[in-house]
Image (cartoon, rainbow, N blue to C red):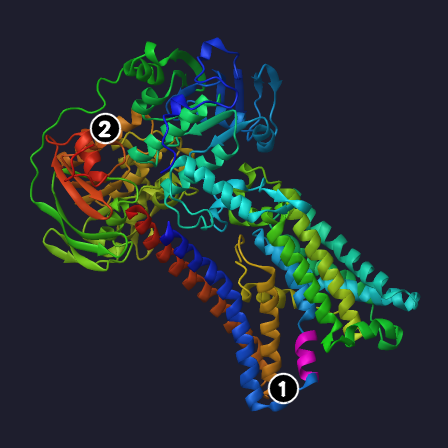
Amino acid sequence: MERVEAPEEAPSSDGHTVVNPHESEALLVVERATKFFGPVKALVNGSITLYPGEAHALLGENGAGKSTLVKILAGVHSADGGYITLDGVAVKFSNPIDAREAGISVIYQEPTLFPDLSIAENIFMGRQPLRSGKRIDRSEMLRRAEDVFVRLGVPLEPSRLARGLSVADQQIVEIAKAISFNAKIIIMDEPTAALTEVEVQRLFDVVATLRAQGAAIMFISHRLEEVFAMCQRVTIMRDGAFVKTSTIDDISIDDIIYSMVGRDIVSLYGEHSRTPGVTVLDVEHLTREGVFTDITFSVRAGEIVALAGLVGAGRTEVARGIFGIDKLDAGTVTMAGQRIKTGSPLQAMNAGIGFVPEDRRQQGLVMQMAIDRNASLASIARLSHLGIIRQASERKLASEWAARLQLKFGRFSNPVMTLSGGNQQKVVLAKWLARQPRLLIIDEPTRGIDIGTKAEVHRLLGELVEQGIAVLMISSEMPEVLGVADRILVLHEGRLAAEFSRDEASEALIMRAAAGQMKAVAS
Amino acid sequence: MATTTAGSTFVTKILRFRELAIVVAIVLVFALTYLKNSSFASTASIQQMLSGPSIIIMLAVGETLVIVTRNVDLSVGSVLGLSAYLVGDLFVHYPHMPVAVALLVGLLIGLVCGVVNGAIVAYARVPALVVTLGMLYIIRGIDAIVVNGVQIQPSQIPQSFVNLGSGSLIGIPYLFWIAAVAVAIVGYVMRTFRPARDLYAIGSNPEAAILAGVRVPRRVFSAFAISGALAGLGGALWLAEFATVASTAGSGYELNVVAAVVVGGVAIFGGSGTILGAALGALLLNTIDQALVASRVSSFWNQAVAGILLLVAIAFDRYVSLRAEKILRVEGAHRDNA
């Protein structure tokens, strides 16, 4: 990589280096912004001030109004009240183009790519570089996209179609898009949710460079350690309203959590020790060409095994292979001593495997369908008589699990998309738990879920293994891996690189194994 | 990086290959039929093979714009019929109307219909399937009323205009030239200009298009307007080709057009496909049609063959996308190794 420079020292175009927020004029001021959707108050008092050169975290639980505030700044929604000033001038955006032209660029939580178009065109849609006669200059477009990727230090090919990109790569394309605007304000709505630590580190470098150039970053994340590593100030919201703004040095994690949830959370991860029982899952020599090779491990009843590794290391793919979604080229899967036919999710389900996928919206739920229907989806055979689904049993199953998982919802007949991320995840869990699985595979269990619910999901997983279920968890969040798992398997480039017990595992060891440095001396 | 490029070129190759596959199919059909019936390669037969699909090609060009945006225009056959009749009627009253004016009038009639379609779909947000199906019947009804049993007769159309439909330049029919020019221009535009790329964006991911600041309603509206205009122009050309117009002119054309577009590799759910592909699709369907006639196969087979081709085209696309996915997957793994 040619670009090796300490971003903090990178000179900006107008001469000054890192700006101290309080010495300069505010770049963006949002004061008491409100937004109603019918009778629903999505935003009661949205207030935040951004200075040039700062990375400013916007924190709050899901439903605190962060996304609404972001969409107002992006020109997607227009505020019903309050005011916004940009460089001291009052502004109002009526569409995304207004916001973009004012210098605000947004990276959304859900990637918004065009699968049929090239990566370069995804980045430059609507503002492709032109040559004479307003014709699109394709080679210039590819060159500029390449430039952005060099800046980001990622090897993505700009002429490739966006179709088939992994979630992490999609997120990287989104970041490239935002950077290519040379925006004054870059809003990142959970940009790191799908990224691994290495990619996050790269993102930090990019953010530092952007700050040095005088841009302001608004950073939304549920990972507080990232907030502390990257941001200078934080603003906290709760229930659609501003709670407080503080510099990062004057606030502790406990303060932040208290302000976000309005109550104390003693500890995110409790201490625990478990004694695992008999072996439930045995996989041997699993291979899917080009994806993973010779994977052998087992999971016992009453333990949580984490699959760690970088994005692209093949973690999700191994899980999909075990559950039979993707075909295997070699290897066997054995459940409780019985070999199961691979390549068939139905066989896997019948053998007692439940699979909670990474992408709730696309793979875990039918978003427009009612809560109870979603919860019963995997148990339909059991709930129907002569092929006709009995709605009463469906409702009964849903209410049972809603109570056990403490689901917060309006009515069972509401579409699942009306729930918050955490509660959606509970519905996916309910769907599989209702089948009383012996093994639950869960991919990124708390991705995009607020801290309060996160702890609840972790507690639930703990309860499940207490009851003797085996859990195979995939997670990109190091604290989650270290805090929840009893054993940690690390994948590197589709191969098992290391295995650690809970006691011997540390962040440094896992990262070293994930980066393929297990045998080499750490530099 | 090298492997990444290799994977991408595979995908690009397949996309080009898609058009090449149609060309190969056309050549194959032609060759096989020639072996059976050597008169299939006569000048007259080849001219027919080029002029026959020309009007469908015009309509397919417009239809591609609409389908790429994840919509569909089912009214093109009716629009063609209405335009053909009204232009013919104008000749009845003004026999000395210049050819260019006649074509322009046809285009404008179609434009009006397309504007109505586009406005309802893009701004009133009614699904295109419903809107254009409604327009299909409405315009057909209007057609029946204006025609009122009085057909346009060849004697009423000036020779200069009929020549346009039957004459040729360096052995290639005028009609085909016109269609080819339309394909060349629109094909170039679709690759080269921002508003045209917006159409692909809309069809590929409508939500993302809005977030990217694409003026979705305006673009969808334009696609329908252009589709209508080309169908109207096609109507005028129909008049030139056949010189006789009944109220049923162009009935069922919309399905031939959609079939041609899909066989030509335009994704029915939008986002991808080329003008050239759509045109080749029309050419292929027509060539098969004529090949069956020349081989004295019952005409009942025509539609069955068209249907089979449609299914083959869709199955082929599905296969290619699965295959491409696998290639990208392996390539992705290599990238991580690099």
Q: Amino acid at mark 1?
A: Phe
Task: Please count the marks in the image.
Answer: 2
Is A395 covered by the magenta stretch?
A: no
Left or right of A78: which side holds B11?
A: left
Do we see residue B229 in this rendering? yes
User: Percent x, y for residue A350?
Assistant: 21, 53
The Cα atoms of the two marked residues, 2 and 1, are separated by 74 Å
Pointer 1 local density, CA inside 10 Å: few below 14, some 14–19, many at least 20: many
Q: Along the line of sight, which residue is nearer the eye, B324 or B72? A: B324
The secondary structure that most of the magenta stretch takes on is helix
Q: Residue at x 40, y 58 (%)?
A: B324
User: Percent x, y for residue A395?
Assistant: 33, 40
Which region is colored magenta? B44-51
Residue bearing the label numbered 2: A479
Left or right of A448: which side holds A44?
A: right
Q: Residue at x 66, y 78 (%)?
A: B49
Q: Along the line of sight, which residue is nearer the eye, A203 or B120? A: A203
User: Percent x, y for residue A254?
Assistant: 28, 15
Residue bearing the label numbered 1: B40
